[in-house]
Image (cartoon, helix red, strand yellow):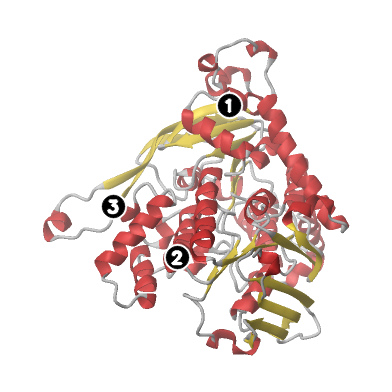
Amino acid sequence: MTAADRAALIEVRGLEVMPREHPSRRILKGVDFEVRAGECLAVIGESGAGKSLALKAVCGLLPPCLRAAGSVRLEGREVLDLGYRRSDRGRRLLYLSQQPMSAFEPLSRLGGQLIETLRTHEPGLSQREARRRIEETLARLRFENPAEALDKYPSELSGGMLQRAMTAVAVLLRPQIVVADEPTSALDVLSVREVLRELMGIRRETGATLVVVTHDLAFARRIADRCIVFKSGEIVESGPMKDFERARHPYVRRLAAMQGVLEKGLAKALAARPDSEAGAAPGDAPQPEENSGSRAPALIEVERLAKSYPVRGARSLRALLAPRARRQVLRGASFSIAPGEAVGLVGASGEGKSTLARILLGLEKPDSGAVRLPPGAATGRLAAMSLVSQNYVDSADPSWNVARILAEPLEIARVQGRAAHAVDAAFLARRLAEAGLPAEKLQARPYELSGGELQRVCIARALIHRPRFVVFDEALSSLDASVQGEMIELLKFLRSPETAWLFISHDLKAVAALCSRVLFLKDGRIIESLAVEQLSRARTEPVRALIDAARG
């Protein structure tokens, strides 16, 4: 029996979601869909379309400020009105959050949280056995040192590592229904492969039903049987995943077309062979960083940066009294970026990309090495530099509205005596419009925005005071292909000859579209620095593996 012949496990009819204080402003506008037992359903759509809210309503996890109406039936039983009182979450129904940093308790170590979750559902399991099973699962999900990761707090792990830890919960509990909200948005292509393998393994071994919210069409094509597409709080398309390219709605056609453009752009970059290097052996491919004399003088120079952190988890008095072991994250990373350059930084999650970004921005100090900046930039670093953070939810004060969030860098620039625009609503609205959001969003607070909308606000904030150096840390990770394309074009338009950008990403398609040069970070070192048109001439095995995985 195929999934199409099976009875509906979840039935959603006339589902509406609206703010409790403003019930006339419907976010979801009466959507209908069903999920059949044993199938994998992909839920696709632009940020703010209502995908996550629909699934949170199904799981009884809507925030208190929102109210749902309509009907949600699980195996014929009405569950919408139960809300947080649901008792079926965990073994029967598991929701994996879009925001990995917010999904874990910040004051408890990761291991204790995962062990507690597993033993809650398997009371007879000993703590030692639970930890062993968790370590084995994390190892399958590309954790190089699972025992060390379990002894850390969530804030000490990268977003990609936390996202894989959430996937580990699904692997360990083997629930009947897994609802995964953007399970791969912060992952490199190699980790995506492992998450895909584990989710498909759960489905194959237990017959579980998967519902995957995603903007990654390549991932959806590989895992899903059917898809539904959200647009402005409504479902505009549904059908088999294999028929996605033949969709009728203009938005869906544009989404498929833009995904094709990004994939073709990477394929074109990989196929390019500079005339000056025709006939050269792969091992002789030159490193652009070594040829830095051909570029303009650097705006920022990084020389042999090293950074380590103490290893937690002493388990005996002798270990507690001994000198603390340290984990080396950066091991002599060196590179430079010239004015007007947009340089990509690519590497697997947990390799130290965000640590490197924090050192460049002066948020952490290196153990050794140097970051050389233009005269005046070191003392006015807050105004001369800017960051679009990977953890965009935590980077915006939840009590501030968007207008105040955007105005903050201008106020800092004014305090430091730099020329700054007057902070008025019209100026803020223009800058917000450049990021693709309407002026009415100026009065919204972060919790009233979707993940993608909040990320656009963070991009607008980072560029509003015209900084000299900008770090984009996974800045496009939560945007669908059509919006990604628009944002890439916008960022190309906003670039200036005086500004240098470092674009940290696991998505080689976006990097190839936006950047002229790519740095590859592995084991704390820049192992290759290649012009985009030289990507096919990578010399090292880790870089070739990333490129091959990106090809699909």
- Name the spot of residue 355 as percent of width and height, x first: 45, 47
Q: Residue at x 71, y 37 (%)?
A: 513
Q: Is residue 501 above or below residue 1?
A: above
Q: Nearer the viewer, mark 1 or mark 2?
A: 2
Report the side of 245 relative to 347 (left or right). Answer: right
In terms of sequence position, does the residue under pointer 3 or pointer 2 come before the other? 2
Q: CA distance from mark 3 to mark 1?
A: 34 Å
Front residue of this view, candidates 202 and 306? 202
Check disc 3 and report the residue beneath it. 311
Q: Is residue 502 above or below residue 338?
A: below
Front residue of this view, candidates 207 and 94? 207
Q: Quadrant of residue 73?
A: bottom right
**Which element is circle 3 on?**
loop
- Name the spot of residue 394 as percent of width and height, x first: 54, 64
The answer to whether the residues at label 3 and label 2 have Cβ atoms under 8 Å apart is no
**Which element is circle 2 on?**
helix
- Name the spot of residue 432 as percent of width and height, x first: 76, 58
Check disc 1 and report the residue beneath it. 530
- Name the spot of residue 261 as percent of width and height, x first: 77, 40
Q: Residue furthest left?
A: 318
> How many other residues sit within 10 Å of disc 3, few (<14), some (14-19) or many (≥20)?
some
In terms of sequence position, does the residue under pointer 1 or pointer 2 come before the other? 2
Q: CA distance from mark 1 to mark 2?
A: 38 Å
Number of marks present in the image shown: 3
Front residue of this view, candidates 456 and 118? 118
Is the N terminus in the top left, top right, bottom left or bottom right quadrant? bottom right
Give, as a three-letter code, the residue at label 2.
Answer: Val
